[in-house]
Amino acid sequence: MTHNLKTLLGPFAAAALLAASPAIAQDDYPSRPITNVVVWSAGGGTDTVNRLIMAEMEKAFDGATINTVNRTGGVGGSNGMSYVFGQPSDGYTLVGLSESVVTAAVQGGWDQRIDVWDIFIVGGSPDLISVTANSEYETLDDLITAAKDNPGSIRAGASAAGSIHHLNLLALENGADVEFNYIPYDGSAPAQNAAVAGEVQLVVTSLAEQQQLIQAGRLRPLAMLTPDGFTLDGIGDIPSAFDSFPDLAEYLPISQAIGFGVKADAPDEVKAALTEAFEVAMDSDAIKEFGRNNYYTLSGATGEESKKIFNNLEALFAWTLWDLDAATVNPEDLGIPKP
């Protein structure tokens, strides 16, 4: 099934209808400025999303000040998380994060589970598999057939071992019962550049990251690594990999989850105020336009829903890194269950 952007964005806007007013009453919270500490560098996807959602939440709080700063370093965002975790549990210091922070503990960055945060998920851009524009592979079926005929011979680019894009590649291998020659890169951009140059024959990154190269005719999209296909402006329908390989449902989707968190032991009234402001912000024109323009699937998950999402991501990332000998701490020692 193929959905357009309006279909993807629509369901999440409904959550904001719970808010009775576009402005949140200020009784005790917030009575002073809030600081949101983004664990990744300025200008990146997590930083951009956090600055946008905080600007909209300021309006929902009727003008309360929310300052967004960056505190990078460590592993898996550990420096920023450690700083915020050391602050009082009063809701005045938030942490801007993404799904990648779930690797911090198994990489020795800190000793906490992801459930020390209550997380608010704005969304993320879905992953897809693409090939070089002049590739001999016209469809995903063509690629998988060739990979089965010559296991390990087709070079596949993605960011570093244990990244979300690498995990999506592993899931594709498992779900389609094939083996690629995985080539790790420092990030999505160099992996995509390698595919354009022909250094690798396929690449797995997000639609937001690939879309300009696809529209410029430098990459050819084969399939979305999500249950539904996608309609890309100027290109048309990109099918779902699930259409040809339904066994992928056992391993996918593994989705980006960008947003922010508050310490889990913050007062309930603080969490309630943040939740109400977040829901209003998610229903704003600015957030919806960002989703449309940047090929983001908006989420709006909070509370138990977002906790379940991040617990699952933590288990998947942690044990994958351990199995790849890329973790320094055994997930079992941290109480992280196997996925």
Image: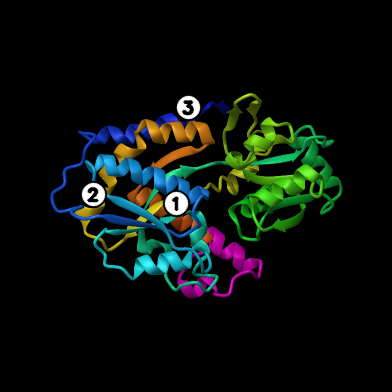
Residue 30 left/right relative to 160: left
Q: Sequence order check: which comes first, mark 1 or mark 2?
A: 2
* Mark found first going from the N terminus, 1 or 3: 3
Under mark 1, the amino acid is Ile
Q: Earlier in the sequence, mark 3 or mark 2?
A: 3
Q: Which residue is mark 1?
A: 309
Which residue is labeled 3 in the image? 7
Q: Pick the residue in front: 313 or 211.
A: 211
x, y percent for residue 315? 51, 61
Residue that numbered label 2 is attached to: 272
**Dot 3 amino acid type:** Thr
Range of residues picked out in magenta: 316-339
Secondary element at image label 2: helix
Question: In this rendering, does residue 174 appear at all?
Answer: no
Q: Which mark is residue 61?
A: none
Q: Amino acid at mark 2?
A: Ala
Q: Is residue 336 left or right of residue 216?
A: left
Q: Position of residue 336 (x, y in %)?
A: 48, 67
